[in-house]
């Protein structure tokens, strides 16, 4: 009962807040809109030039043009959706796709090394959002890490829509929403157009070197406008850098008062230098001999070649017996002395070669005025080749102190990090010339779709659509390891111990760590050079072969036939136009997981094929009521799903690991595979009220609810026996009954409980031309508030990457020649675990602190053929920091700095 009351209180507060905000924002518009308005939308779906709130004769161009175009599309859509449109071919109003999408209500962006890379929608993580290009799957090459938007260059996009309420003809998989990226349809344009763009991109934190980007787009039509062609090419190089200080392991220690507290157990410095070379191409060929037939072929290609140089110092494990607690905050030691510290000096080189291509053939035929047939054939494949080579030198560093009482200025007192004095024979404890892995990933999908529409043209039913689709999707990863971990006491087996390069002469000096932002932290360190280490090994004739890693090698095949029936509605209700769609989709999934059974030595015991079949009935409803010419009310309801997710931590095979711990105690670790997980499903309801006025002005208030079921979580347990051995104890301390061997067991399960998410979105786009003597000023922005059920982590499905409050605000000014645009994006704190972030730590979680980022864009249009842009991304030098359990306890600090760009565009 208390929980129900809390929900109503929350709903009442949000409704009151949103209503007040809507009233305040709407006052100027309502004053201008006192005129009588027709009860229905004009035939073309627009609200017309010179209507309320905009002076007659105003020409909408530039950024305001993209806002108006996106609002017009939203206005005509029967679904609840939001979007952003290109100002012109090859001229998208953002630096990259994620920076554009983050302006859309309910969408949050996550950074990797300062680049916008992944998104979440309405509080659900990136893995729950489906991304399509032209309505079809664009295979994510590195599918284990989710869809990466930074491989999509904006030059290929004509518009982006985030669809929050699906229709039955849409593919499933968008539990939180579907992001669709539209490319140009050639025959939408008359005549020829040619655009060229040159851009320079600069990462100040990396060193200030500009890297190039070149792009070109060509659109033309032939044969009296019956044949159209589009070609778009883009090439760019990027460099960036990210610095990270973080704690990834914790241990229980005894404080001076005898209480047990958690203490940091490993501290890490990590600097990542990233170099990227990207090639993006898209093309289309369209044939339309008459209004009754259209044939469209579209192709997209993306290649991303990225290298990483990760230089890091790993201090720890400290060990409980070595730690003296000096200060405690909220049950966590935030100031400690460590009697003896070991340090891994680690340089890891990585290369990631990602490539995706997609081809779609769409035929539309209208044999009569009442019958419409659409057929689609689609194929996409993505490949990722990931390589990593690490060299590690472990030495003792003596005593140290760590003071985190001020999370903004962590103090770390230890022996010199820029001296090579510690790297001696007596002080070295471990080394590895080569330690790493290869992964070869492939994602494919082949699909065929047929839709038949019958126009009825009278009464409630405007048309009926019957459709079917079959697609086969597959995900495969082949893993290999190549490790040569040395033993300092066995120089016969590992003669390379004598060849370890002198760090004083071969090492790399890393300076300005974290931008020197923490005065108590050594900001320079001497890092080993992995390339030198590994070339030394090669020069002495020692080869480290790659050996199969069968426990991380698997293939998933899913065969998915679907059928759907939809009714498109167009009628009147109380004299008002009511448009809508009512549909149901049936899908059957046949899944075959091929994986290896392995023993404790990673030897293959056998190959298993785990078969799983399940079916889902997915109803959907979208209603749109044109209350007036300017006011639209919408209602949507649907059931959605996303199939079991794959990420870098997915275990498909039952994996048994045996060994001896650092305390010389035998252990057995058993992780059961995830082959039989059920899909996540959600029932959802959306309500939206939208007021359109003037030429590109609008206010939107929307509320939504999702009830999510079958979320996954990891269960740790201790069975009564295993392989004939009697066990005892808890999940955290499971041992053999005789007390000689430690055991651990884990399994990923579906949560049968329903997790509820409630939220509201408020959006506004407003021109100030009617208020100010200087024309061209305006603002667009939105705010989203999300309230999820609270679930204790470890006891069930937990919503990670969820920010309860997000907002963005973009004030702008533009005239015929100049434009200025400032985007301010805020995201409140959100929780992550190791599946979401490498920096969260092994088996732990952290909370990323609230963050606000500002981006500035400047434009100058010389004439119709030539324009220039300049901008600063992360103008306010914002950064992502995290805490552990309590906001006063440090866990992670990062710095990525500002990025600058300059570009010139010509079109003719």
Image (spheres, rainbow, N blue to C red):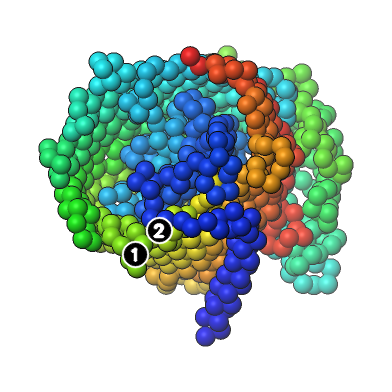
**Is residue 552 at all visible to an observer of this figure?**
no
**Is residue 657 at all visible to an observer of this figure?**
yes
Residue at (52, 80) in percent of width and height: 4
Residue 64 higher or lower than 635, as above or below: above
Q: Is residue 898 left or right of residue 160?
A: right
Find residue 409 and report its horizontal and vertical position in percent.
Answer: 83, 48
Query: Tag on residue 586?
Result: none
Residue 662 higher or lower than 747, as above or below: above
Element under disc 1: loop
Element under disc 2: loop
Residue at (37, 25) in percent of width and height: 189
Q: Are marks 1 and 2 in contact (CB under 8 Å)?
A: yes
- How many residues crowd around disc 1 within 10 Å: few (fewer than 14), some, or many (20 or more)? few
Q: Which residue is mark 2?
A: 39
Which callout, 1 or 2, points at the residue further toward the start of the chain? 2
Q: Which residue is mark 1?
A: 575
Instruction: Looking at this view, name the residue that lies furthest to the front.
Output: 36
Residue at (58, 74) in percent of width and height: 12
Find residue 757 and report its horizontal and vertical position in percent.
Answer: 50, 65
Q: Quadrant of residue 679?
A: bottom left
Q: Is residue 190 left or right of residue 870?
A: left
Q: Quadrant of residue 895?
A: top right
Residue at (31, 53) in percent of width and height: 167
**Label 1, label 2: how many angstroms apart (C-alpha)?**
8 Å
Find residue 600 and report its horizontal and vertical position in percent.
Answer: 43, 49
> Is 737 in front, or is 657?
657
Instruction: Looking at this view, name the residue that lies furthest to the bottom.
Output: 1
Find residue 199 and report its horizontal and vertical position in percent.
Answer: 60, 19
> Is 504 in front, or is 685?
685
Residue 286 higher or lower than 715, as above or below: above
> Is 31 in front, or is 832?
31
């Amino acid at each position: 009962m208390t929980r129900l009351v809390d929900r109503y209180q929350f709903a009442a507060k949000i409704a009151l807040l949103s209503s007040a905000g809507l009233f305040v924002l709407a006052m100027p518009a309502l004053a201008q809109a006192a005129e009588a308005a027709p009860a229905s939308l004009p035939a073309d779906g627009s609200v017309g030039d010179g209507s309320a709130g905009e002076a007659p004769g105003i020409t909408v161009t530039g950024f305001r043009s993209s806002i108006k175009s996106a609002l017009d599309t939203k206005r005509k859509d029967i679904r609840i959706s939001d979007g952003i449109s290109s100002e012109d071919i090859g001229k998208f109003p953002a630096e990259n796709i994620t920076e554009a999408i983050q302006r859309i209500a309910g969408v949050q962006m996550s950074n990797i090394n300062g680049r916008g890379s992944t998104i979440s929608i309405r509080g659900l993580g990136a893995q729950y959002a489906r991304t399509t290009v032209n309505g079809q799957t664009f295979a994510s090459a590195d599918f284990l890490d989710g869809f990466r938007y930074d491989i999509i260059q904006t030059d290929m996009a004509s518009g982006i829509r985030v669809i929050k309420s699906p229709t039955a003809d849409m593919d499933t998989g968008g539990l939180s929403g579907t992001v669709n990226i539209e490319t140009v349809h050639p025959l939408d344009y008359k005549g020829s157009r040619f655009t060229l763009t040159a851009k320079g991109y600069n990462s100040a934190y990396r060193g200030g070197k500009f890297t190039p980007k070149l792009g070109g787009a060509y659109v033309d039509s032939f044969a009296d406008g019956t044949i159209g062609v589009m070609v778009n090419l883009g090439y760019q190089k990027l460099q960036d850098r990210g610095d990270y200080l973080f704690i990834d392991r914790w241990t229980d220690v005894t404080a001076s008062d005898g209480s047990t507290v958690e203490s940091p157990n490993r501290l890490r410095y990590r600097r990542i230098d990233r170099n990227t070379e990207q090639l993006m191409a898209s093309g289309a060929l369209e044939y339309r001999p008459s209004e009754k037939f259209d044939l469209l072929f579209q192709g997209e290609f993306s290649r991303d070649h990225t290298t990483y140089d990760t230089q890091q110092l790993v201090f720890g494990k400290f060990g409980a017996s070595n730690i003296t607690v000096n200060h405690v905050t909220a049950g966590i030691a935030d100031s400690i002395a460590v009697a003896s510290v070991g340090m891994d000096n680690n340089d890891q080189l990585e290369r990631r070669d990602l490539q995706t291509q997609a081809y779609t053939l769409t035929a539309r035929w209208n044999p009569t005025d009442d019958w419409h047939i659409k057929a689609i054939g689609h194929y996409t494949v993505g490949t990722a080749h990931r390589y990593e080579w690490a060299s590690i030198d472990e030495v003792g560093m003596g005593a140290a102190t760590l003071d985190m009482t001020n999370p903004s200025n962590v103090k770390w007192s230890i022996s010199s990090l820029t001296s090579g004095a510690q790297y001696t024979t007596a002080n070295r404890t471990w080394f590895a010339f080569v330690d790493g892995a290869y992964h070869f990933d492939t994602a494919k999908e082949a699909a065929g779709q047929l839709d038949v529409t019958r126009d009825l043209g009278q009464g409630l039913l405007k048309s009926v659509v019957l459709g079917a689709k079959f697609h086969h999707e597959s995900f495969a990863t082949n893993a290999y390891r190549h490790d040569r971990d040395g033993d300092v006491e066995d120089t016969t087996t590992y003669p390379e111990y004598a060849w370890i390069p002198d760090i004083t002469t071969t090492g790399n000096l890393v300076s300005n760590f974290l931008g020197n932002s923490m005065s108590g932290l050594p900001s320079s360190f001497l890092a080993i050079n992995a390339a030198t280490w590994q070339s030394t090994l090669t020069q002495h004739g020692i080869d480290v072969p790659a050996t199969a890693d069968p426990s991380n090698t698997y293939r998933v095949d899913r065969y998915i036939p679907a059928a759907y029936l939809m009714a498109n509605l167009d009628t009147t209700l109380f004299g008002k136009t009511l448009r809508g769609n009512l549909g149901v989709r049936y899908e059957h999934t046949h899944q075959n997981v091929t994986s290896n059974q392995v023993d404790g030595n990673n030897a293959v015991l056998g190959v298993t094929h785990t078969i799983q079949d399940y079916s889902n009935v997915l109803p959907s409803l979208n209603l749109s009521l044109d209350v007036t010419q300017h006011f639209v009310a919408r209602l949507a309801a649907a059931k959605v799903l996303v199939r079991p997710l794959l990420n870098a931590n997915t275990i498909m095979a039952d994996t048994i690991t045996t060994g001896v711990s650092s305390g010389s105690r035998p252990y057995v670790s058993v992780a059961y595979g995830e082959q039989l997980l059920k899909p996540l499903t959600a029932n959802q309801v959306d309500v939206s009220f939208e007021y359109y006025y003037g030429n590109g002005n609008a206010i939107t208030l929307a509320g939504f609810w999702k009830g999510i079921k079958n979320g996954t979580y990891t269960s740790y347990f201790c069975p009564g026996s295993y392989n004939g051995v009697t066990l005892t104890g808890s999940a955290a301390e499971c041992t053999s009954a005789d007390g000689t061997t430690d055991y651990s067991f884990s399994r990923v399960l579906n949560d049968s409980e329903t997790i509820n998410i409630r939220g509201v979105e408020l959006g506004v786009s407003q021109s100030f031309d009617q208020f100010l003597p200087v024309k061209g000023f305006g603002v667009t922005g939105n705010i989203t508030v999300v309230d999820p059920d609270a679930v204790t982590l470890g006891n069930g499905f937990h919503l990670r990457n969820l920010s309860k409050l997000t907002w963005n605000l973009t004030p702008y000014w533009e005239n015929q020649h100049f434009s200025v645009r400032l985007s301010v994006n805020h995201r409140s704190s959100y929780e992550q675990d190791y599946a979401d972030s490498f920096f969260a730590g092994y088996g732990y979680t952290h909370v990323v602190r609230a963050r606000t980022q500002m981006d500035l864009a400047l434009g100058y249009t010389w004439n119709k053929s030539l324009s220039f842009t300049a901008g600063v991304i992360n103008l306010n030098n914002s950064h992502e920091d995290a805490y552990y359990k309590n906001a006063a306890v440090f866990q992670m600090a990062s710095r990525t700095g500002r990025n600058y760009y300059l570009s010139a565009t010509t079109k003719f």
